[in-house]
């Protein structure tokens, strides 16, 4: 770990504070591990630790069709168009083509995965794995097969692929092998459309323009969602662009939600009043109907 | 038509929910059961988180019970004194049940206990009711047999006797009080109104005449579920009023249809129907416990 820290320190010293950067765009930090070439490697690039070496040759400029999703009473999912271009001062480099990965991520929450076992003839929950933070929704859209366009070192650096997006086991675990549990979590959530890997869904034109449609499911939860756009060459992350998507309840949804949590007694009495009035109203209406 | 529920945070089909409410309302009017034992598992099935399903189910039961009890009041088939005694027991039981529920939650086996409770109680009651109704149906076909008004058993020998005129009973106040407490406990643990346990208890244990049983149990259920709804709303914020309204719209209509239908059908036939339904739900739950599940893993959100 110490090696990684000193490495990062050197690089940050080499980079001037006033380095020109597009908003939201960041230079990727070097991945940890000595056997992996550090980007941008001075020797390979053939330039000294000058300012130019620190500015990535290719940068993302991107936009979202909407940076806020309003949950109304009739909300049944939403499509977000993510589009952008690659900004570069130099000609398109030779070698394998540019690739793009886009992730959309809901706020993380703690959860428990239970496993059933047969005890005395009855199937009951016996073993558990606690996950400290897992996103409630996670979509990965790519311009090609994920395992071919992204190196594992960079994947673990940015936690791009689904298994890595699940972070931090919560405390000491009671089971020896947690892998089947996290696999089950991904499988169950993929079935519900909450976790998605859509390979090849990012359309890339002339290694410069790209676009992707990410559909948000109907059972969305409130929160600040994160969008990340990765530019990749040779499996390495060249540039990252981040943008937030705000998902909020509006109108009657918001009003009810706030009332339920701010004035629970009032809300409870209101729920009861609705029930009593509806029951009494229907009873009266039917009696009138029968007499008529 | 999809609708987003503000507290449950899921999007569901409004017509499915209204239909579900209607079905449960029909049963409420027909049998005098709140229908919670059906609505709660059905809500789980369409993807409503369990705590919200339990709390909102209780709110829905309030509406259909009010609707049903009013219809019974018109027909003078509610024993208010008996209802009051059952209610007093029910509130105490509900409070005790929530306390037991919290203990179960800390142990971590709520689901199992709830499911086992369902299987055991539904199985016992369903079998008992089916047996009794078949015997009664046979007797009614043989008019020479005359049944006594009710059997005298231990219930009639206890102290503090009370006159329940509408039921034509003069019995100790303790047995109905105990029935109320037991129903309240089970109601809180199983997240139901408890009518499916109370109705047979009133008939077979207290010896109440069938015609006042349904109205009286609806009367008790109305207040116990109202108390439960309020408790859930205040302490856990799990009542989804949007979901409740959809269920209620279907429920109140179903309850009225059920009450009208119930007046035309014969009591023995009704009881056979209810017994079969109870056994069906029991069988389904038992199969879930004993058969190898398709998916061994399940996800619970929230810390621990």
Image (cartoon, rainbow, N blue to C red):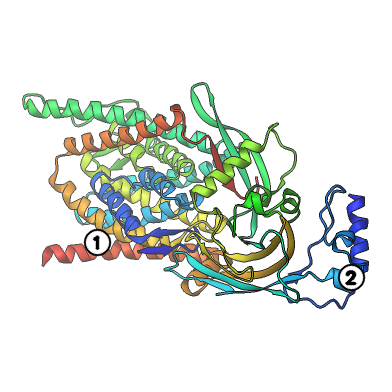
The answer to whether residue A173 is left or right of residue B196 is right
Residue B90 in the image, given as x and y percentages of width and height: 43, 45
Residue named by callout 1: A283
Quarter of the image for residue A235 reads: bottom right
Q: Quadrant of the N terminus of chain B?
A: bottom left
Residue under the image location 22 percent in, 50 percent down:
B258
The answer to whether residue A90 is left or right of residue B38 is right
Residue under the image location 22 percent in, 37 percent down:
B273
Tell which circle, 2 or 1, labels the residue nearer the N-terminal end: 2
Q: Note whether residue A161 is visible.
A: no
Label 1 sits on a secondary structure element that is helix
Residue under the image location 22 percent in, 30 percent down:
B150
Residue A228 in the image, given as x and y percentages of width and height: 66, 64
Q: Nearer the viewer, residue B3 or B162?
A: B3
Quarter of the image for residue B205 reads: top left
Up-down: is A161 above or below A90? above
Chain letter belonging to callout 1? A
Q: Nearer the viewer, residue A252 or A189?
A: A189
The answer to whether residue B182 is left or right of residue B150 is right
Chain letter belonging to callout 2? A
């Amino acid at each position: 770990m110490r090696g990684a820290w000193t490495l990062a320190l050197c690089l940050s010293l080499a980079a001037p504070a006033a380095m020109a950067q597009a908003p939201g765009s960041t230079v990727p930090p070097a991945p940890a591990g000595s056997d992996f070439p550090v980007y941008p490697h001075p020797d390979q690039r053939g330039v000294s630790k000058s300012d130019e070496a620190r500015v990535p040759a290719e940068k993302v400029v991107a936009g979202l069709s909407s940076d806020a999703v309003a949950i109304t009473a009739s909300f049944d999912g939403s499509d977000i168009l993510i589009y952008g271009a690659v900004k570069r001062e130099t000609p398109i480099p030779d070698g394998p083509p540019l690739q793009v990965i886009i992730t959309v991520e809901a706020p993380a929450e703690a959860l428990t995965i239970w496993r059933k076992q047969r005890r005395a003839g009855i199937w009951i929950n016996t073993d558990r794995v606690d996950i400290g933070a897992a996103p409630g929704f996670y979509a990965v859209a790519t311009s090609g097969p994920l395992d071919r366009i992204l190196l594992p070192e960079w994947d673990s650096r940015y936690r791009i692929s689904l298994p890595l997006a699940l972070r931090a086991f919560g405390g000491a675990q009671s089971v020896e092998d947690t892998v089947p549990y996290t696999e089950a979590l991904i499988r169950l959530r993929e079935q519900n459309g909450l976790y998605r890997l859509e390979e090849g869904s990012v359309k890339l034109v002339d290694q410069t323009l790209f676009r992707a449609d990410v559909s948000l499911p109907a059972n969305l939860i409130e929160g600040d969602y994160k969008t990340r756009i990765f530019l990749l060459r040779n499996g390495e992350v060249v540039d990252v662009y981040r943008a937030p998507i705000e998902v909020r309840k509006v109108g009657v949804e918001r009003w009810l939600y706030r009332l339920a949590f701010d004035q629970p007694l009032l809300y409870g009495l209101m729920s009861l009043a609705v029930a009593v009035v509806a029951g009494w109203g229907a009873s009266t209406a039917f009696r009138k109907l029968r007499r008529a | 038509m999809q609708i987003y529920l503000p507290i449950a945070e899921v999007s569901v089909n409004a017509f499915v929910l209204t239909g579900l409410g209607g079905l449960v309302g029909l049963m409420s009017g027909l049998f005098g059961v709140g229908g919670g034992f059906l609505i709660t598992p059905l809500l789980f099935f369409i993807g409503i988180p369990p705590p919200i399903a339990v709390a909102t189910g209780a709110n829905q039961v309030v509406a259909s019970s009010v609707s049903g009890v009013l219809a019974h009041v018109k027909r003078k088939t509610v024993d208010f004194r008996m209802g009051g005694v059952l209610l007093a027991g029910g509130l105490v039981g509900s409070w005790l049940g929530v306390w037991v529920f919290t203990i179960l939650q800390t142990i971590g086996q709520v689901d199992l206990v709830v499911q086992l409770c369902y299987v055991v109680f539904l199985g016992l009651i369903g079998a008992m009711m089916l047996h009794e109704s078949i015997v009664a149906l046979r007797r009614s076909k043989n008019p020479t047999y005359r049944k006594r008004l009710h059997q005298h058993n231990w219930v009639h020998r206890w102290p503090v006797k009370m006159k329940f005129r509408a039921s034509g009973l003069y019995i100790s106040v303790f047995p109905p009080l105990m029935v109320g407490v037991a129903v309240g406990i089970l109601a809180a643990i199983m997240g139901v109104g408890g009518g499916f346990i109370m109705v047979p208890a009133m008939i077979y244990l207290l010896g109440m005449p069938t015609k006042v049983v349904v109205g009286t149990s609806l009367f008790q259920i109305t207040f116990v579920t109202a108390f439960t709804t309020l408790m859930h709303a205040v302490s856990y914020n799990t009542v989804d009023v949007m979901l409740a309204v959809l269920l209620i719209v279907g429920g109140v209509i179903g309850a009225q249809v059920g009450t009208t239908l119930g007046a035309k059908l014969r009591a023995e036939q009704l009881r056979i129907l209810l017994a079969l339904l109870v056994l069906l739900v029991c069988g389904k739950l038992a199969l879930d416990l004993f058969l190898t599940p398709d998916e061994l893993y399940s996800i619970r959100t929230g810390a621990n």
